[in-house]
Image (cartoon, helix red, strand yellow):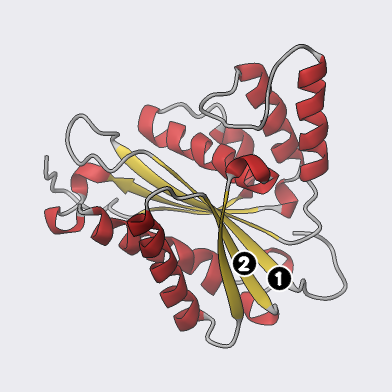
Amino acid sequence: MNEQSTSPRSFFIFLDEGGNFDFSPTGTEYFTLTSVTLVRPFQMAGPLDDLKYDLIESGLEIEYFHASEDKQTTRDGVFKIVQQHLRNIQIDTLIVEKRKTMPHLQAIHKFYPKMLGYLLCYPLERPLLDGYRTQDVDEVVIITDQIPFKKKRNLVEGVIKQNLKKILPDTSFRIMHHSSKSSMELQIADYCNWAIFKKWNSGDRRSYDLIKGGIRSEFNIFAGGERFYY
């Protein structure tokens, strides 16, 4: 994290996910949930903005960064910047091998809150880099990409509020849903989660190896499970 004489006023936690909710052989093999924790000043926003306009000047039409859609040269540029700032970033991720998910948990209203709750324990409960603790800040701000379905949005907000009140009862918090186009930090979370998802879902470690130095926890929740449900 950033070197500061006092603890930061706020922690910002940016969330992203990979995979789908199709629990069948036609769905993705894995589902990933990733959080990226940052404190201000956000040191990657400026270099990423410069990269975007360098790409525009080179003839590329680009509005924002999105790992699964960007050209490899663009991804190389983004990951280079992220790699240069790994000491200022904390990545926590939860991995779900979906075919090991018990049938009663496969409905989205049960699956998503359960998995998000497990993930949030890592950035909220454990001491952060450079000795910062969530208990020492005035506020925790959690930002997700815009969620189009009200039901899922309510699920996300409910589980976040429940975990924050349990883990940090004396800390103020806010939950926001922003368009990823408006936030370089959400785009960073997208890139980090994409790299992790690619490693698990297809065995492609190219991008993962660039950011692994910033990954503090990588929890494969059903690693010990031996039963497949489809």
Disc 2 and disc 1: Cα gap in Å?
7 Å
Q: Please tell me which residue is depicted at 84% across the width and 76% down the height of the picture.
A: 6
Q: Earlier in the sequence, mark 2 or mark 1?
A: 1
Q: Amino acid at mark 2?
A: Val
Q: Position of residue 27 (x, y in %)?
A: 25, 33
> In the image, what residue type sits under mark 1?
Ser
Residue 101 in view (yes/no): yes
Direction right: furthest residue: 5
Q: Nearer the viewer, residue 168 or 225?
A: 168
Q: Secondary structure at mark 1?
A: strand
Q: Position of residue 43 (x, y in %)?
A: 80, 49
Q: Quadrant of the N terminus?
A: bottom right
Residue 141's label in the rendered image is 2
Quarter of the picture containing the C terminus is: top left
Q: Position of residue 90 (x, y in %)?
A: 63, 55
Say if mark 2 contacts mark 1, CB within 8 Å. yes
Q: Residue at 55% across / 35% down in the picture?
A: 208
Q: Could you say which disc has been placed on residue 29 in the image?
A: none
Eyeballing the image, is 134 above or below 44? below
Q: Position of residue 215 (x, y in %)?
A: 57, 50
Compared with 159, 37 (above or below) is above
Which residue appears at 75% of the width and 35% of the height? 81
Residue 212 visible, this orientation: no
Residue 38 position by quadrant: bottom right
* Disc 2 secondary structure class: strand
Mark 2 residue crowding within 10 angstroms, few (<14) / some (14–19) / many (20+): some
Q: Which residue is mark 1?
A: 10
Q: Quadrant of residue 74?
A: top right
Near mark 1 (Cα within 10 A), the count class, few <14, some 14-19 or many ≥20, is: some
Asked if 164 appears above or below 116 in the picture, the reply is: below
Numbered circles on residues, count: 2
Closer-to-camera residue (167/180) = 180
